[in-house]
Amino acid sequence: FNTHMDKNYLLNKALINWLLQSNPWTAYRTRLDLLHQAESDPAVSAARIEMFTHPLVAGLTNEIQTWPGDAITNHKNAGLLLHKLVFLADLGLKVTDTPIKAALTHLLAYRSSDGPLQVIVNIPTHFGGSGQNTLGWILCDTPSLTYSLAVMGLKDDPVILSAVDHLAGLVRPNGFPCTGSPEIGRFRGPGKKEDPCPIANLIMLKLLIQYPDRLNSPVVLSTADTILNLWEHSQQQHPYLFQMGTDFRKLKAPLVWYDLLHCLDVLTQIPSIRMDPRLLDMLAVLTDQANELGQFTPTSIWTAWKEWDFGLKKQPSPWVTFLAWRIVTRMNPA
């Protein structure tokens, strides 16, 4: 393990203090994931309460009460209610927390006959859809909804387990395809039918690794290999128009789409692949973007999140810095 970060500085007290003093969501996750403090620790509890009452977080929890929200017409739209739900799950909200508990009936209300949870989508007729708002699911949305509910505390709920089992069964030898429920019609992304869909593979992997018994399963390992293989051959392979070039390598939060931070955050949760040269190569692209203090600055932003600390490109972001260091410390606990 040899990176820019490894050679020049460590995760030091000054950087930790900067994270702790930045904003409540970064402070809360820093205490849990970098300092490994217990939820019962008074400092952790205080940070969690402060996070809950922050206007930006409270705004998101209020929005979740309107689930399922507007129809999805573009899965890359970072302002979708679906992506806001994922972010709340990543922050650490649980189904026992009042705002999520209040929305739970709606979150679980739409379930297809074969198991996966549905959202409202609107696919234009020229893309093979009906052009109407339709309840259905696509492999670039339902894994994120299922992931959120699993992480929030429903991992062993029969509804969630049924959805996970059905989705996992869709894997092919080269990963997960672009596919969805019958309600979406003839829709398929712009690519060859036999190709894997990069974003579907990423969020399916993100979902499956929440289950320890699946961590070293053939499905998980083959899906991880699909992403690493796309990285290795990024000059030649661009399935469904997904590329791993300049834009992919820019640092961007929250973890919405197929990019460097998102891929690394998911892949580094699989211990058995941490020494894969392809993953180490990807990691070096991240660590080389740190400044001399070990801080990371967003190099791309989602305008829907411009009010957050990661919504500015001209100054280091505590949240992006936390995400980067969580990745690094998984790879190199020392």
Image (spheres, rainbow, N blue to C red):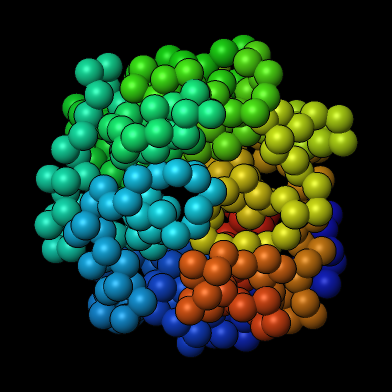
Number of labels in the image equals 0
Residue 326 in the image, given as x and y percentages of width and height: 57, 60
Residue 18 visible to the viewer: yes
Residue 90 visible to the viewer: no
| Quadrant of the image occupied by residue 15 | bottom right
- The quadrant of the image that shows the C terminus is bottom right
Identify the residue at the far right of this view: 235
The foreground one among 212 and 101 is 101
The foreground one among 226 and 20 is 226
Task: Classify residue 23 as left or right of residue 221.
Answer: left
| Quadrant of the image occupied by residue 322 | bottom right
Residue 282 in the image, given as x and y percentages of width and height: 76, 47
Task: Classify residue 312 as left or right of residue 304.
Answer: right
Task: Classify residue 205 as left or right of residue 47.
Answer: right
The foreground one among 178 and 325 is 178
Task: Classify residue 156 as left or right of residue 309.
Answer: left
The residue positioned 82% from the left and 36% from the top of the image is 234
The residue positioned 21% from the left and 45% from the top of the image is 107
Residue 250 in the image, given as x and y percentages of width and height: 73, 60
The residue positioned 79% from the left and 80% from the top of the image is 292
| Quadrant of the image occupied by residue 232 | top right
The residue positioned 39% from the left and 62% from the top of the image is 91
Residue 62 in the image, given as x and y percentages of width and height: 23, 67
